[in-house]
């Protein structure tokens, strides 16, 4: 009936209600949840879509891979359509917990959200994880080192960590004036010459 309302009668709102009814009677019906998600995307009902993704995450039999994808979808949804950086951050953190190994999309999203939300210690942690992953091209890696160096210098007060990061920047880009200036100041502050 729901599919009929959706496809043959072009009554998407009625189909949403019918798919909701299906899920009330069979709460673990993954196919019904996905049909409903498709309709909600078409109707741009973003809050309802978020609820449906959350519902599917809690369903029995949802694979770990699908659960990870749903957390990513939630992160994207809250970041772009619902414009709530804190909620997006929470979902990306859940995706990070659910992922096995490093995931570039998750790390990149968290890096941007931690920066936007001024969550500085976790931002430093993500930068380190990005650098340790070996998944980034040299230009992105040097940008990560530079950001980590600036963060440790200006916000975290981690002089030894800042010295390490600025030294890497200087090794990769000899003559980099920012790195030289910051290292000189850090060495002076630390009493090292």
Image: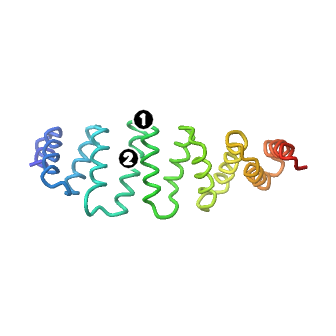
How many marks on residues? 2
Q: Position of residue 55 (x, y in %)?
A: 27, 50
Residue neighbourhood size for the residue with mark 1, other residues' Cα within 10 Å, grouped as few (<14), some (14–19), many (≥20) = few
| Residue 92 pos. (x, y %) | 45, 49
| Residue at the (59%, 61%) spot, across then down | 133
Q: Nearer the viewer, residue 102 or 41?
A: 102
Residue 90 image offset from top left, x and y in percent: 44, 46
Quarter-wise, where is residue 50 in the image?
top left
Residue at (13, 47) in percent of width and height: 21
Q: Name the outermost residue toward the top.
A: 83
- Spot occupied by residue 57 in the image (x, y as percentages of width and height): 31, 54
Q: Residue at x 31, y 49 (%)?
A: 54
**Mark 2 highlights which residue?**
74
The earlier-in-sequence mark between 1 and 2 is 2
Q: Residues within 10 Å of mark 2 (few under 14, many from 20)?
A: many
Q: Is 69 displayed left or right of 129 in the figure?
A: left
Q: Residue at x 45, y 60 (%)?
A: 99
Label 1, on which residue?
83
| 149 lies left or right of 86 | right
Q: Identify the element where label 2 is drawn.
A: helix
Kindly indicate whether the residue at mark 2 contacts the one at mark 1 (C-beta within 8 angstroms).
no
Q: CA distance from mark 1 to mark 2?
A: 12 Å
């Amino acid at each position: 009936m729901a599919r009929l309302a959706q496809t043959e009668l072009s009554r998407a709102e009625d189909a949403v209600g019918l798919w909701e009814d299906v899920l009330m009677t069979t709460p673990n019906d993954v196919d019904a949840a996905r049909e409903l998600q498709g309709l909600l995307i078409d109707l741009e009902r973003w809050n309802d879509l978020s609820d449906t993704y959350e519902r599917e995450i809690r369903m029995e039999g949802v694979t770990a891979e699908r659960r990870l994808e749903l957390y990513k979808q939630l992160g994207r949804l809250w970041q772009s359509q619902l414009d709530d950086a804190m909620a997006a951050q929470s979902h990306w953190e859940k995706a990070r917990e659910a992922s096995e190994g490093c995931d570039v999309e998750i790390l990149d999203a968290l890096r941007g959200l931690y920066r936007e939300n001024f969550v500085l210690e976790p931002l430093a942690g993500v930068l380190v994880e990005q650098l340790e992953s070996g998944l980034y091209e040299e230009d992105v890696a040097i940008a990560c080192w530079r950001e980590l160096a600036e963060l440790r210098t200006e916000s975290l007060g981690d002089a030894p960590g800042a010295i390490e990061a600025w030294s890497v920047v200087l090794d990769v880009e000899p003559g980099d004036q920012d790195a030289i200036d910051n290292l000189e100041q850090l060495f002076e502050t630390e009493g090292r010459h």
